Image: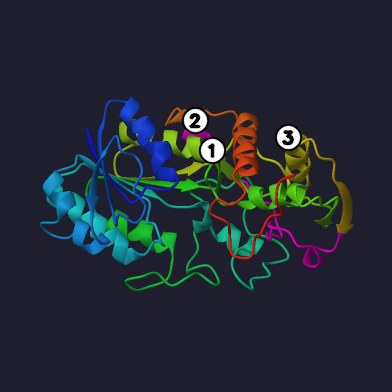
Amino acid sequence: MRIAFVGGTRFVGPAAVGQLLAAGHEVCLAHTGAHEGLPEVEHLHGERAELLGEGGAVERWRPDALIDTFAGGATAWKAEQVAGCAARCGAGQVVAISSMDVYRYLIDAGIGEDNPGTPVPRGRLPIREDAPLRDAPYPGAADVAGGGVHDNVAMEAALAAGFDGRVTALRPGTIYGPHRDSRERLIVEWVREGRRVVELPDGGDQLFHRVAVDRLGRAVAAALDHAPDGFWACNVGDPGDWTFAGLVGEIGRLLDWEFEFASVGFDEADHPWKSRHPVLCDTRRLEDVLGVSEPDPGAALAECVAWLWENPQADLAPGLRPAEKS
């Protein structure tokens, strides 16, 4: 098939494009040109509205399917753009990179700025794709260029209503892997700076479902062949996960570093897991329908940690300034 990938130059794209090319698809990347890379595929440059607009470069390329990462934030307006382009192209499918943040449970768990969550979450774990969704953007959702605030629920709904072909919404957890600025980086930097004591909020039992970028890349490619007709959502996560305390300990082990732990109150610790309740999603559709079961989470984490250790200055988050590696 001819696959137009909207965005996808920095993180999810490279992981997915490799899988698409291996499956024999012809791929183009439609993006602004700010981050090039991936010389093995064709590149279409321009602003999003121009690329996806009537008579634009994507339409002229005539793809059979479109994949959209919704870089910079998801909105209904962006979904309408890609749905309209797909319809004019005669494409049969749109694959959208959404998020596990669509579920109401995550609001109860405390996702978002200044959101304390609820004492008791509504719903059970693991979260299935038919669980209740949010009825508004999560607290503190960022404004998106072009209008609106980031909201994967609104994006998914607009795609489902605006495109008659197959719409596959992939809902990944927190993505980690090489080249990704992530929670794992913070823990690696604790080792780099020589920190020994780590404060564990409420004992460090927090769990926020994660996914290796390679697993998401495999899910993107598999969706083109195996996703059912109509609108279909699929959680994309590793088969199980570490708690915050477990992940800190495992990264320490990978870097031959031994932490000491101190249990403190939830609001007293500087930690990247701000969820009051564990977030764990059902990933049976990913394996049973899409057939995705790789990579091994332990090996994927080891690859991620090794890359972060060897690339201390790459794509640092604001305020994160690691010490020199000794």
Residue 312 visible in the snapshot: yes
- Image marks 2 and 1: residues in contact by CB distance under 8 Å: yes
| Residue 275 horizontal side relative to residue 10, left or right | right
As drawn, the label of residue 254 is 3
Q: Residue shown at 48%/52% (left/top)? A: 99
Q: Nearer the viewer, residue 309 or 159?
A: 309
State the extent of the magenta-drawn residues as a range.
Answer: 264-287
Categorize mark 1 by other alpha carbons within 10 Å: few (<14), some (14-19), many (20+): many
Side (left or right) of 318 relative to 98? right
Q: Tell me what residue is drawn at x 58 percent, y 60 percent.
A: 317
Q: Residue flagged by tag 2: what amino acid is it?
A: Glu
- Judge by depth and name the residue closer to the eye, 107 or 41: 41
- Numbered badge on residue 287: 2
Queried whether the magenta region covers residue 195, the answer comes back as no
Question: Which colour scheme appears in the figure?
Answer: rainbow
Residue 151 lies, in percent from the top left, at: 43, 64
Between the C-alphas of marks 3 and 2, the distance is 28 Å
Tell us which disc is closer to us: 3 or 2: 3
Using the numbered discs, state the Cα–Cα distance from disc 2 to disc 1 in whole angstroms.
7 Å
Amino acid at circle 1: Thr
Q: Is residue 71 left or right of residue 54?
A: right
Question: In this figure, which residue is indicated by the disc labeled 1?
Answer: 283
